[in-house]
Amino acid sequence: MKLRRSARLVDMTRVLLDQPHELISLSYFSERYQSAKSSISEDLGIIKSSFEHEGIGTLKTVAGAAGGVLYIPLVNQQEASTVISDLKETVANSERLLPGGYLFMTDILGDSRLMKKIGRLYASIFADRKIDVVMTVATKGIPFAYSIASFLNVPVVIVRRDTRVTEGSTVSINYVSGSQKRIQTMVLSRRSLKTGSNVLIVDDFMKAGGTISGMVSLLNEFQAKVAGIGVLIEAQDKEAKLINDYVSLVKVDEVDETSKQISVTDGNYKEFLTSGESVKHEGDTN
Amino acid sequence: MKLRRSARLVDMTRVLLDQPHELISLSYFSERYQSAKSSISEDLGIIKSSFEHEGIGTLKTVAGAAGGVLYIPLVNQQEASTVISDLKETVANSERLLPGGYLFMTDILGDSRLMKKIGRLYASIFADRKIDVVMTVATKGIPFAYSIASFLNVPVVIVRRDTRVTEGSTVSINYVSGSQKRIQTMVLSRRSLKTGSNVLIVDDFMKAGGTISGMVSLLNEFQAKVAGIGVLIEAQDKEAKLINDYVSLVKVDEVDETSKQISVTDGNYKEFLTSGESVKHEGDTN
């Protein structure tokens, strides 16, 4: 169909947003709208300006025969600060406090609107790394992991604590939980992860880092590589962390059961926010 | 900022797609772009035509002081057939066959691109029902449930098989699994679900329907209502189903371990596809 520019812009915006990090050829658009590539390029210019102006990401153009355009979701400093301060306020709500100083987090992790914002933020932080798959451990953090995966447009892989017949053959490892020094097991189905994959490991909560270092060991069994580590919330722990190179959004510094005070500060995410310029793509010429 | 129509269209499309089923006032757009409401209405007309033409949904306009516009994700027959025939082909792959006639489904459920399409399809099927929350049981089906929830723009609630200290006080029920006649337990944290909620129950797999009827019983404990039931895959079972009123996408009719044949047909979803006209919204005047 031949479309007017206005209709083309609406549809192109929708197609690009729907497939982040995926190269779409100019010919695809040109055939879809029966328009000259020069018009398509102008349209892409308008969309790119709008995305950058609103701070929601950018379009990368890849030149050459195998070239095209891809949408990279990015979050700017200002938007990141808004998301994080909302998150801090939510986490610091004293009603979350459970006996033993634990925090109730299930509502936060099930909030699809919030997870969308946080998934976009993490996809922005890891936009310039090569990531084939996002991995997490069951159960609570799965929506968090899935949201990041959907903005990076890669699959999500779920490590379990138990074996199920529907997982087929599995690889299991024992690891020592960092804070409680208990031996635990984690299991991943053999078919879930290809050898050599670049894996972004994420979890909703990290104390000493035992679970995450367990996932790192599991990756070794699959000859897979750690492409990055991201946690939603890190907690202060007396023990030294087992993991150093990670990104966290917020940090629970102290939980006082008597006064019902939860003190929450920024995680280290600011050091990792990506600017549009640093994002590379295979076959990139500039 | 004052924007030209082209830039306005790109940004409005993005804002609408980002917040499905959420009423956005015309004043919001009018202030955001410093444009007259008449221009905003024209823009919305262009976006609505494009969405409907591409079969990705519609815009509903709600008149009056508390009015505005909302984006309803919809999938047309043609798009639905494409998604379902891809899914049937994927499920019928003989490499999924595990000892005992079980099927390996983990890769399908972790495929964020596919889950996006399926989430949109289910959001389309249930577009005209009042849904406050999507509920599923851990673990594999969580990305499926989350994707539906994100297109309906509601939270997701996860029922577990075990109790965790971080869930706070919980409600637990025993139920009999339909096909294996075993007594099992499911647990939901007390805070996860408000009394009177309208709940869409979903699961990745249904045989006799024991797990789903367990979730229905659990809803009774919370005085919550079943707004709908959706499964990704239903399987043939000798026993009568415990659940009647459900939507399924595909149906595994037979698994032959000797010949490695998996026969997969369409589920009953076609009876439930929503057309744009039937979608109502509170405060609707037409």
Image (cartoon, coloured by chain):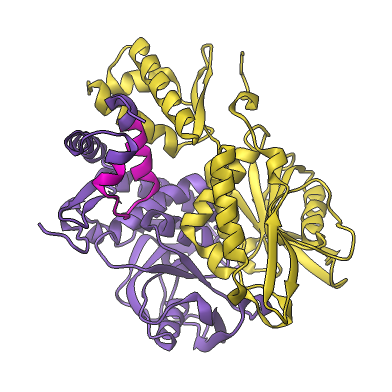
Chain colours: A yellow, B purple
**Residue lying at 61% horizontally and 77% vertically, measured from the top left:** B167
Q: Any magenta on residue B17?
A: yes
Q: Any magenta on residue B180?
A: no
User: Going by the image, does B12 lie left or right of A111?
Assistant: left
User: Going by the image, does A83 lie left or right of A159?
Assistant: left
- The overriding secondary structure of the stretch rendered in magenta is helix
Which x, y percent locates residue B250? Answer: 38, 58
**Residue lying at 79% horizontally and 54% vertically, measured from the top left:** A218
State the quadrant of the N terminus of chain A: top left
Work out whether residue B102 can be spotted: no
In the picture as drawn, the residue positioned furthest to the left comes out as B286
Using the image, determine if residue B208 lies above or below residue A28: below
**Residue lying at 35% horizontally and 57% vertically, measured from the top left:** B122
Magenta-drawn segment? B9-29
Which x, y percent locates residue B284? Answer: 16, 60
State the quadrant of the C terminus of chain A: top right
User: Going by the image, does B243 lie left or right of B47?
Assistant: right
Along the line of sight, which residue is nearer the eye, A207 or A3? A207
